[in-house]
Image (cartoon, rainbow, N blue to C red):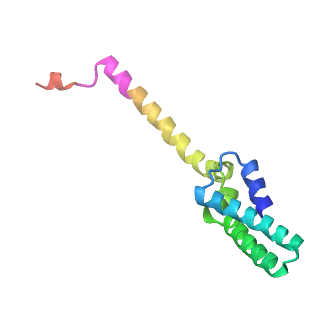
Amino acid sequence: TLQNLVELVDSLPDVVVREEIGDMAFKAAAKARSSAAAAAAGDIGLALAEAREALTLALTTTFDDSVVSHLYFSWEFKYAVYLPVALPIIVPIFASAVRQMKAVLLSFRKGKMRTSRDRK
């Protein structure tokens, strides 16, 4: 699971990992190394306890809401989902605003619109 987190962060360079998530990942790696050292020394009880803590920390970091949201809702995903929905709405509004601005400018040029000085 720590390898999955590293692969996720490497694959999405725009992902900002919160400091506490990074600390948990480093603690999980330290616990995993400690578990391996305890197993090599023959202390199975300590090795299992350290491995259990490492797994808990690794799962907590992997399934944190901020990490999962970047995994499933990256900016590419948001553009792919929302652009086809928003574009048919935005283009006509923008085109009508441009058309309206052109009409207002044209009427000012022709002198058909009265300004505030003309009314006095």
Q: Residue 43, how many percent across, how many down? A: 84, 78
Q: Residue 110, how many percent across, how many down? A: 33, 18
The residue sitting at the left extreme is 120
> Residue drawn 80% across and 64% down?
33
What secondary structure is the magenta-colored segment mainly? helix
> Residue drawn 84% across and 68% down?
36
The residue sitting at the front extreme is 41
Which residue is at the front of the view, 91 or 29?
29
Task: Answer above or below: position of 50 versus 79.
Answer: below
Instruction: Look at the image and tell me in which quarter the N terminus lies.
Output: bottom right
> Residue drawn 67% across and 69% down?
60
The image quadrant of residue 18 is: bottom right
Task: Answer above or below: position of 10 versus 110.
Answer: below
> Residue drawn 23% across and 25% down?
114
Residue 110 shown in magenta:
yes
Magenta-highlighted residues? 104-114
Task: Answer above or below: position of 120 versus 74.
Answer: above
The image quadrant of residue 119 is: top left
